[in-house]
Image (cartoon, rainbow, N blue to C red):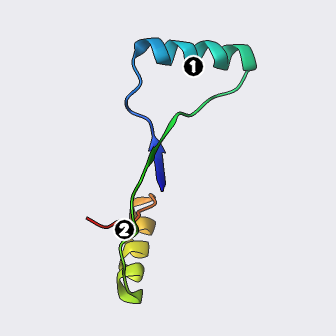
Amino acid sequence: MLCSLSTKLGTNELDEIGTLEEQLGVTLLAFDWHALDPAPIGAEQVTRIHDLEEKLGVALVAVGR
């Protein structure tokens, strides 16, 4: 299972979230869940992925196709 920031919310949903943020005085992040299987990778591949993560400042996840 993997989660990512939601990109499927419409204007109405975003307005509802914004209203709740104002009421609570906090920032809310919306996530979607994805059923994914991790890809079987070796130590060299992990190192290469980690190096690119460091370079780009992001988290990368290897998943099966």
Snapshot quadrant of residue 42: bottom left
Mark pair 1, 2: CA separation: 31 Å
Residue farthest toward the left in the current orientation of the protein:
65
Q: Which residue position is annotated with label 1?
A: 17
**Residue found 43% across the figure and 74% down from its top:** 50
Relative placement, left or right, of 10 versus 25 is left
**Residue found 41% across the figure and 64% down from its top:** 61
Q: Which residue position is annotated with label 2?
A: 62
Element assignment for label 2: loop
Relative placement, left or right, of 41 versus 57 is left
**Residue found 37% across the figure and 69% down from its top:** 52
Q: Nearer the viewer, residue 42 or 38?
A: 38
The amino acid marked with disc number 2 is: Ala
Q: Nearer the viewer, residue 26 or 17?
A: 17
The amino acid marked with disc number 1 is: Ile
- Binning the other alpha carbons within 10 Å of mark 2 as few (below 14), some (14 to 19) or many (20 upward) gives some
